[in-house]
């Protein structure tokens, strides 16, 4: 079996020419901590749509809180689970 010329050589170990960070990341890139310029004012139809969506979200949150309250009420009135021995006795008597 012939040996391949790449055995023992890692192509990732090649030495790259020294480059400064500015050459890799140009100074014109947005920097951390810098604020972006303010965006243009949204169109009136977008404002109306946003208000409509916010109203829907508020209504849905209200429905969710009502449902959570009903779930809690059902859970408090639910009878406790049967003990394991009672379930096994019932299964034996039923012939299972």
Image: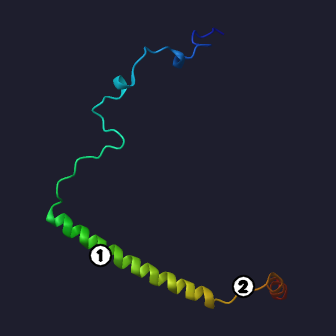
Left or right of 59, for residue 36: left
User: Circle 2 — which element?
Assistant: loop
Tell me the residue at 58%/13% (across/down): 9
Which quarter of the image is occupied by the C terminus? bottom right
Image: 44 above or below 13:
below
Q: Nearer the viewer, residue 5 or 27?
A: 27
Mark 1 or mark 2: which comes first in sequence? 1
The answer to which image quadrant residue 43 occupies is bottom left
Left or right of 36, for residue 86: right
Which quarter of the image is occupied by the N terminus? top right
Residue wearing tag 1: 55
Tell me the residue at 34%/38% (across/down): 31
Image: 42 above or below 73:
above
The answer to which image quadrant residue 6 occupies is top right
Image: 55 above or below 66:
above
Residue 78, position as x, y percentages in the image? 64, 89
Left or right of 22, for residue 2: right
Residue 77, position as x, y percentages in the image? 62, 91
Tell me the residue at 54%/83% (across/down): 71
Tell me the residue at 28%/70% (across/down): 53
> How packed is label 2: few (under 14 Cα within 10 Å), some, or many (20 or more)?
few
Residue wearing tag 2: 81
Residue 14, position as x, y percentages in the image? 50, 14
Residue lying at the far front in this picture: please name it: 33
Label at residue 20: none
> How packed is label 1: few (under 14 Cα within 10 Å), some, or many (20 or more)?
few
Left or right of 17, for residue 79: right
Residue 5, position as x, y percentages in the image? 57, 9
Q: Nearer the viewer, residue 92 or 72?
A: 72
Residue lying at the far left in this picture: please name it: 44
């Amino acid at each position: 079996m012939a040996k391949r010329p790449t055995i023992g050589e890692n192509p990732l170990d090649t030495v790259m020419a020294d480059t400064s960070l500015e050459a890799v990341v140009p100074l014109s890139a947005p920097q951390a901590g810098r604020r972006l310029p303010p965006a243009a004012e949204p169109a009136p139809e977008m404002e109306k749509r946003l208000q409509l969506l916010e109203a829907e979200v508020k209504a849905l949150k209200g429905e969710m809180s009502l449902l959570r309250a009903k779930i809690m009420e059902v859970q408090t009135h639910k009878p406790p689970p049967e003990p394991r021995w009672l379930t096994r006795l019932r299964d034996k008597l039923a012939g299972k």
